[in-house]
Image: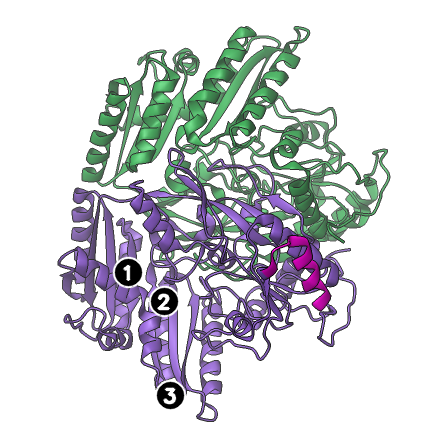
Chain colours: A purple, B green
Amino acid sequence: MEHAIREIEKEVGIEDIISTDAEDLHAHGYSEWSSINLDTLPVAVAYPRTTEHVSTIARICHEHRVPIIPYSGGSSLEGNFSAPYGGISVDFAYMNQILEFNKEDMDIVVQPSIGWQDLNEKLAKMESGLFFPIDPGPSAKIGGMIGTNCSGTNAVRYGTMKDWVINLTVVLADGRIIKTRRRPRKSSAGYNLNSLFVGSEGTLGLVTEATVKLAVVPEQYSVAVVTFPTIRNAAAAAAGVMQTGVPIAAMEIMDEVQMKVVNLGGATAPRVWKEAPTLFFKFSGTKEGVREAITRVQKITTANKGGNFEFAQDEREQKLLWSARKESLWSMLSLRKHGQETWSTDVAVPFSRLADIIEVSKKEMDDLGLFASILGHVGDGNFHESIMYNREIPGEREKVETCVKNMVKRALDMEGTCTGEHGIGWGKKESLLWEVGPDTLAVMVALKSSLDPRWVMNPGKIIDVPWLKVQYPGADKAVTPVRRLSE
Amino acid sequence: MEHAIREIEKEVGIEDIISTDAEDLHAHGYSEWSSINLDTLPVAVAYPRTTEHVSTIARICHEHRVPIIPYSGGSSLEGNFSAPYGGISVDFAYMNQILEFNKEDMDIVVQPSIGWQDLNEKLAKMESGLFFPIDPGPSAKIGGMIGTNCSGTNAVRYGTMKDWVINLTVVLADGRIIKTRRRPRKSSAGYNLNSLFVGSEGTLGLVTEATVKLAVVPEQYSVAVVTFPTIRNAAAAAAGVMQTGVPIAAMEIMDEVQMKVVNLGGATAPRVWKEAPTLFFKFSGTKEGVREAITRVQKITTANKGGNFEFAQDEREQKLLWSARKESLWSMLSLRKHGQETWSTDVAVPFSRLADIIEVSKKEMDDLGLFASILGHVGDGNFHESIMYNREIPGEREKVETCVKNMVKRALDMEGTCTGEHGIGWGKKESLLWEVGPDTLAVMVALKSSLDPRWVMNPGKIIDVPWLKVQYPGADKAVTPVRRLSE
């Protein structure tokens, strides 16, 4: 390990390319926002400046069988950047630039550590008329967004991360650099490597550059809020909107607890929201188009007992309102008292089942006396549960864990998925196995092994391989050769 | 080989599961519409009725190292279903049913041999208000559409095949049956196997079931046609439409030759179209939305010297007009005289380069005295060239081949792709290598080898592996073990 670090320093020729500072290690192996934290930390943090640096790091780590863990925004929630086997965390902090902007083609080439909000601010400053529409947590960066195939509130209109990637530059496990494709918006040439690397959480390679599509900034936005007597009414209204194809820019559900959290957080003060199941709508398009969509949505919500169709009164309020939604996890975190933690997780189901799963999951948490809020991207059948617990009260964390597992099992019983946008990371490996079963997991193992036969790329994430034993430095595991599927 | 056939018949227990009828073999190994035809044919055609039959066929073929080639609509253009090494063509003709319709969730589970037009007719008959928006050639079927990640005129609005697949049931090389995921519209759980199998042309597994998303049928359609003095003006207008984000349902470019072909074909008689570079627009949405989009598009086309903004006058004319576009390849084929053939191929470029590549490619063909038409999905930067030639005139086919290769090279020089929607098949393997280079191709080889180590799944398509020698029955090739990347 020490040897690998010295070799990297020597080959790259930049003195501070590697840090072993204790705080640095902690910052790269521990997440305050997540309940999936391990006792281990990375042994070092590398700060590459170029794709070639990353290639050198990978090659040397591969040679010495040292784990490599990519790091960008650090906002993931399932221990996606944790370091179960030590190794080197590769922080792309210095690789945060726009490399090429093809305005006419509506695409842009960026490095992994540019944040999506930062990217959008730059596009606005350039008066490009374009924006990048994928909107996960505010601090997320492109690299991690690719890793988890993230999405956010705009997904119902714009899809998820995979839909916006034109090409990727990827450093493979052994240091080889590949580009998935050139710059066409559409291609049927060979295997779709973009979609394979997107969502692979750094387990197949390290993304060092991405060309992403951009969308045209709509002429007009509007934000509206409607409350309902029950979650079921709100979900029925949302289904109605989807099934009639009304063009909405976003449609979010928040339960009465989450509305309370917004009020307590004070982000939209002095406005105080009714603490009831609520749908947030974002409309975008031309003036006329927005007006028409609003009329149609109002008709649907009214038919489902929705009341108080309220608009944000101006752009400021629109922004506040929407940011209250975007920062709901932060609001929840800010309510923590001494010893309290928040477990935040997501599942997705076919949207006809959304009300069912939310109702049962809420009841289970209520019965256990847990403070928990629910909010969701209702048009995608995707929702988040944030559960507060006190780690100092014996058994409380276990109660939460059981709740989360039950929610995952319920989602799977309803033909859903254990995660709509957060990814598997360390936290949901068992859930993934439940979800796809051993044969499909074996396909993933085969793919992983074919691109990373030594399992050095973010090991322990997405898949644990029971029959695979790899010798990581410092860990007491022996190597056995990786077997391929169907041989 | 003979042994494998007998074993399949015995295990499946249906007498006509396998055909070795000469006409049948010809129909499954030769395409009248394509210029990519080989001298070889499959040795047998299998007609499975269930996923389990397909599994049995795969397992036995795998055991005996017999190639397996999936077949559904047979409308692909790059020799995608040809049989370079003999083997068994698996025709899904009996697997053409809707298995489950989840109206509330707006998805449907289908077998591979249902045609997209047939599916849409059934959805219309059920008065579901839903449709499947991917529209390749009229005779294409879901299985093949998945194989090539096809698209069509609707792609500019609705994306390509990969964007509509929720899950797939896949029979792997060794007969194992997997399901890629359950039924959520969105997921970040593990590797994106949907997008890996979509576009893999049957080289990684055989798709036996697919759950696909459906879209809401728009309230209103309108179709309009605008002519331009030059292709460059037409392309500039199209770029303007994209860059201002006017919502269009489709936007197609046809050159003066293709317009002539439409007139000669007579599909829209008595209407005769001006033989000039032309943009076809399809608008959809609400009445108001369509009207607004048309006004905005008219402004843009006028600014780019577009004239004669003409509407289809009623639904009948709309359909005729659009079907003239959809059946352009057929129109071209119908003009063939004795000895003539049509070479039809596609490339895609970043759309700012579309006019450049069309102009140069047209000039090259004109200079060579070839009759060729161009039409394209201009919003995706994707276009098709159909070149007529006489195979009886010495050297003429070679001229066409050179034209096609030059067009591919030009597309790649402009950061494009060698195929936007037809796939690689047998015909574009060299182009794929030019496009992605040896290291990226090595990744594809590694993935292929990991799921199909004996290379029995549609061998010779997408990738030829120079160092791989597999013993196919009847072929004079020796087996060497498949090597994995980066070991």
Q: Are marks 2 and 1 in contact (CB under 8 Å)?
A: yes
Q: Chain of mark 2?
A: A
In the displayed structure image, the side of residue A16 where residue A398 appears, left or right:
left
Residue type for callout 3: His
Q: Which residues are magenta?
A: A1-15
Report whether mark 3 lies on the same chain as mark 2: yes
Identify residue for label 2.
Answer: A354
Report whether mark 2 lies on the same chain as mark 1: yes
Q: CA distance from mark 2 to mark 1?
A: 10 Å
* Residue drawn at x 29%, y 56% as measured from the top left: A250
Q: Chain of mark 1?
A: A
Name the image quarter holding residue A223: bottom left
Q: Compared with residue A160, is residue B234 higher up or lower down, i.e. above or below? A: above
Residue type for callout 2: Leu
Which of A106 and B478 lies nearest the eye of the viewer? Answer: A106
Identify residue for label 3.
Answer: A338
In the displayed structure image, the side of residue B69 where residue A319 appears, left or right:
left
Q: Are marks 1 and 3 in contact (CB under 8 Å)?
A: no
* Residue drawn at x 39%, y 36% as measured from the top left: B156
Which of B269 and A262 lies nearest the eye of the viewer? Answer: A262
For the N terminus of chain B, the image quarter is top right
Q: Compared with residue A236, is residue B157 higher up or lower down, i.e. above or below? A: above
> Which mark is on residue A238?
1
Q: CA distance from mark 3 to mark 2?
A: 34 Å
